[in-house]
Image (cartoon, rainbow, N blue to C red):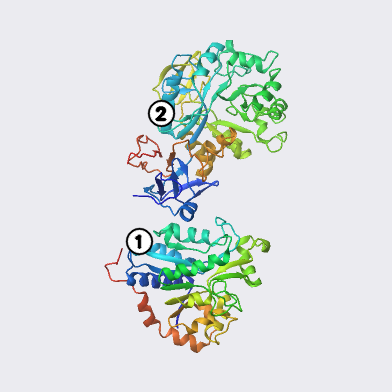
Amino acid sequence: MPSNKSVSDAPITQFINCRILRDNELQREDLWVREGRILDPEKLFFDEQGYADKRVDCEGSIIAPGFIDVQINGGYGIDFSQASEDVSDGVSFVAKKILEHGVTSFCPTLVTSPPEVYHKVLPQVKVHDGGPHGAGVLGFHLEGPFISAEKKGAHPEKYLRTFKSGGLEHLMEVYGSLDDVAIVTLAPELPGSQSVVRELSQRGITVSLGHSAADLSQAEEAVQQGASFITHLFNAMLPFHHRDPGIVGLLTSDGIPAGRAVYYGMIADGIHTNPAALRIAHRAHPSGLVLVTDAITAMGLPPGRHTLGQQVIEIQGLHAYVAGTKTLSGSIATMDMCVRHFKQASGCSVQEALEAASLHPAQLLGISPKKGKLDYGSDAGQSRLHLYFCLPAVRAAVVPPLCPQRFLGCSFGLFSWWGEGAV
Amino acid sequence: MKLIILNDYDQASEWAAKYIRNKILQFSPGPNKYFTLGLPTGSTPLGCYKKLIEYYKNGDLSFQYVKTFNMDEYVGLPRDHPESYHSFMWNNFFKHIDIKAENTHILDGNTADLQAECESFEKKITAAGGIQLFVGGIGPDGHIAFNEPGSSLVSRTRVKTLAKDTIMANARFFDGDLSKVPTMALTVGVGTVMDAKEVMILITGAHKAFALYKAIEEGVNHMWTVSAFQQHPQTIFVCDEDATLELRVKTVKYFKGMMHVHNKLVESPPSEPKKN
């Protein structure tokens, strides 16, 4: 059908019979898209006298922005912390697989490793947009090695480090490069952390507190220097104490500088955090909750033994332990499972659950105008559009015939779409 | 005139929508024969628009060969402001139906030369062959469109300064802040609407009752501009019980007695809908 649009000839698709997550609520509206950008249909109508070339009936599904996973260590047999020659292939493989869970952008995470690993792995993967081929990479999340020995969790002790003098320069020696790094997790009680936090923040890198035995005032100090995230709240940190809430206390601290917000990662797999604890955190600071998978190599794989960083892991059901111990080494839940579990455990609305996996991580990383939202002009994913349909009802997913990735299993459906359609 | 009295707002809206639907279907619009419709904004026609959308969604009515001309638009309000009449028409009507943008006409209150815009609007109406059916509402002060009390009864499309009453009535759409309400508007004239082949005025609610009384039971008077339609050969007033509260019992009984005849005008079309 010839289009009569004066601005662009690119075809316009109109998604009808859907609910859109926009302005913090689910609105019953149509979604109009051209070339991977969301259009304002009123502007299209009056300014361009344009109309839709193609209509897709969503049959009542919800359209939500793609999920953003800021802590994922690998999956499907791929371990991002393994120094191999084809890291970027591994990242691309996982990127493609996680589309099925609705994740359209992520931060490949490296656990504590020796400098050789960082020097080999980091240069192989650049920040890039995603598309039908796979989720986009927003930058690495370097979890360690500047963490507390007391709270190392599954991280290998022999590679832990402290800040030598020279702060950032020492960091650069260890990591090699910070060019494609989005997040660094560190323990603020390590001497010399203040200048490191400050310098990393100034470089636009998100500083996260985790694997730490810091008390609340040390944590607040770090936030004042620029830290804005907490790595997997409750895990690998001092427990909440009523006279010194520790890092957990940041959720309700009055020591946060004005205009700044502290976000906190939550592994909502039903294992890493008791639902009651999840609820306490959520109720204390709902707008800061960021769902993360902290998924490990074994995510997506059958039960058994697998490698993570420099250690061996054992899968038992939905649990992943450091082999031979009962220390949790990470999660194998997928992001859509986390969103669903979070909604169920906290009793929050569908809209809040979806925002915890999309809007909040986008706000954390400072990319929200383009991603994490379905506002006019937004990417809704990346340069190509990825929509995530989810069905809060139990019925099986409705997947439009042009979707190449059939939805699997639970009550979430995935829809992929791109310009030169597969219709 | 025909005075159609229904029990409540919903029934009045439905009657009006059915009437419009039937008029369009009987006209059998096509690519060389467009049905031209004049349209109002405000809270009164909302129910009618909802019904028309329903008829479109059911497949009983298409707006593919319908041209619309809105009565008015604020001056100086950005077109995408949620309270502009462009936004109103988009959100409450156009986006739900199959009308083409080029067939809709709304005055542009943001052009540099407002006078030229008004003249051009009149020309567009003429070029479209005139308006088949002009649907309008009535203000509490008896105005049609923005033809405030004192407007000439032979006026054409022009710029008008809004009366204090109108600004106050509109304040509820601007968070109750009088300073935010536009003070000028472009409006079709009384004469422009009089030129239409048929005029249908929707009047619902007790607060419009006095205006209705002035419009149909008193003389033609430029202080109550809707009264001009007493001199139009084809006028229908569609109202609810509350809007008749200021009329004489005799008037109401007379027209209620005619409802069985008037209701024939809104009967469903024969089982084979004339679709284009």
Residue B165, relative to residue A255: is it above or below? Answer: below
User: Which one is nearer the viewer's eye here, A156 or B3?
Assistant: B3
- The alpha-carbon separation of the residues under discs 2 and 1 comes to 42 Å
Relative image position of residue A420 (x, y in whole percent): 36, 39
Callout 2: chain: A
Quadrant of the rendered structure where residue A197 is? top right
Q: Which of the image's four quarters has the C terminus of chain A?
A: top left
> For numbered disc 2, what is the local secondary structure?
helix
User: Which one is nearer the viewer's eye here, B215 or B46?
Assistant: B215
Task: Give the amino acid type for the residue marked by disc 2 in the picture.
Answer: Lys
Relative image position of residue A265 (x, y in whole percent): 57, 31
Instruction: Tell me the residue at 56%/79% (across/down).
Output: B225
Relative image position of residue B185 (x, y in whole percent): 59, 67
Relative image position of residue A391 (x, y in whole percent): 42, 43
In the rendered structure, the answer to whether residue A173 lies left or right of residue A35 reads right
Is residue A315 visible to the viewer in this orientation of the structure? no
Q: What residue is disc 2 on?
A: A97
Q: What residue is disc 1 on?
A: B58
Task: Give the amino acid type for the residue marked by disc 1 in the picture.
Answer: Asn
Quadrant of the rendered structure where residue A394 is? top left
Callout 1: chain: B
Instruction: Tell me the residue at 55%/69% (across/down).
Output: B187
In the rendered structure, the answer to whether residue B158 lies left or right of residue A165 reads left
User: Which one is nearer the viewer's eye here, B130 or A93?
Assistant: B130
Residue B158, relative to residue A277: is it above or below? Answer: below
User: Which one is nearer the viewer's eye here, A235 or B228?
Assistant: B228
